[in-house]
Image (tube, grey):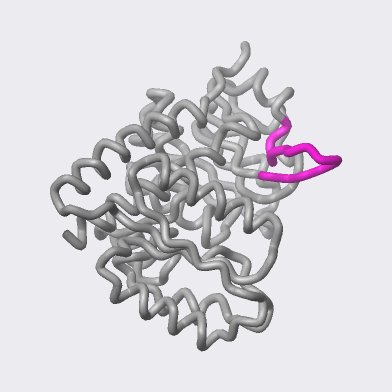
């Protein structure tokens, strides 16, 4: 058996096409484009690439981008002042502060000043709390993209045995809540889980978000499972996932590649969050 590849690029393109339709309709209706403000502090090379990709995706899909590239010396107070200004700007529907921030700026303090209605990344405590309570909210982009990837397979989440390996606030915790919201039975494994293989082998849906190259191998996976690899590990200039693709693809029913799986979905769901934010504020 060879697993079917879940093509994140293709699914992301479909989502972006729908975003563009909604964004163009909003522009005609409101006389302005939806807007995303992206703030970058410092000269981190990877962050600059991520910001460039996000701005490009906005421009390609009828969303106006406001780019703020601030020097490394920017103070926490100056950054908060900019965020508060953007909170009051009617042309800005979403605000994104690119992480990581320089060491002298407290991430949690800065992010807490973004309006929950403009939280493009879906990272704020208020939105995370609403996700836990099942209330409408702007949710973290990568977990939302994972749900779309799983749905694309046609596998029914209702009653499925889902195992999430990793408990980060950005992926592990929110994807567990989204899987619960879709009526899956969820087990969360992490670095303190004894013999996590006992859980992964019984998973109908396996989401791996640890940051350890090749952690999951074929013998750890249930026959026919849906395997979502969130890992992005660089070695010798190449990108690898948390899943050993060669061995797992011989066992799984569906699997995401790295690259080309979860990654493209994160930007697509960011755009979808901007649409959601704009329509909520309309």
Decide if residue 210 is in sight here: yes
Compared across the picture, whether 228 is left or right of 248 comes to left
Q: Is residue 150 above or below residue 44?
A: above
Q: Is residue 72 magenta-colored?
A: no
Q: Is residue 166 above or below residue 22?
A: below
Compared across the picture, whether 150 is left or right of 258 comes to left
**Which residue is depicted at the point 49% across and 79% down?**
110
**Which residue is depicted at the point 46% across and 44% down?**
57
Q: Position of residue 169 (x, y in %)?
A: 52, 62
Depth order, front residue of 156/67: 67
Compared across the picture, whether 129 is left or right of 2 comes to left
Q: Which residues are magenta?
A: 232-244
Q: Is residue 8 above or below residue 63?
A: above
Q: Is residue 230 above or below residue 122?
A: above
Depth order, front residue of 280/60: 60
In the picture, residue 42 is in which quadrant? bottom right
Q: Quadrant of the N terminus?
A: top right
Q: Residue furthest bottom?
A: 77
Q: Is residue 241 magenta-colored?
A: yes
Q: Residue furthest right?
A: 236
Q: Quadrant of the C terminus?
A: bottom left
Compared across the picture, whether 105 is left or right of 267 comes to right
**Which residue is depicted at the point 74% across and 41% down?**
215
Depth order, front residue of 70/99: 70
Decide if residue 122 is in sight here: no
């Amino acid at each position: 058996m060879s697993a079917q590849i879940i093509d994140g690029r293709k699914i992301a393109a479909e989502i972006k096409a729908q975003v563009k339709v909604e964004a163009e309709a909003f522009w005609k209706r409101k006389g302005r484009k939806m807007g995303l403000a992206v703030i970058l502090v410092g000269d981190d090379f990877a962050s600059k690439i991520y910001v460039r990709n996000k701005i490009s995706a906005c421009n390609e899909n009828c969303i106006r981008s406001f780019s703020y590239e601030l020097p490394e010396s920017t103070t926490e107070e100056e950054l908060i002042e900019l965020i508060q200004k953007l909170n009051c700007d009617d042309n800005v529907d979403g605000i994104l502060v690119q992480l990581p921030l320089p060491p002298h700026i407290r991430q949690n303090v800065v992010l807490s000043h973004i309006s929950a209605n403009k939280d493009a990344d879906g990272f704020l405590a208020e939105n995370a709390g609403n996700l836990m309570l099942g209330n409408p909210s702007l949710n973290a982009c990568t977990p939302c993209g994972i749900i779309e990837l799983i749905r694309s397979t046609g596998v029914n989440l209702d009653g499925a045995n889902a195992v999430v390996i990793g408990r980060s606030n950005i992926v592990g915790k929110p994807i567990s809540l989204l899987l619960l919201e879709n009526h899956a039975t969820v087990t969360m494994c992490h670095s303190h889980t004894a013999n996590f293989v006992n859980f992964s082998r019984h998973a109908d849906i396996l989401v791996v978000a640890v940051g350890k190259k090749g952690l999951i191998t074929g013998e750890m996976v249930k026959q026919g499972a849906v395997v979502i690899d969130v890992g992005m590990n660089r070695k010798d200039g190449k990108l690898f996932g948390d899943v050993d693709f060669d061995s797992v693809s011989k066992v799984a029913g569906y699997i995401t590649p790295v690259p080309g799986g979860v990654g493209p979905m994160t930007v697509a769901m960011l755009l979808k969050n901007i649409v959601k934010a704009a329509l909520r504020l309309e």
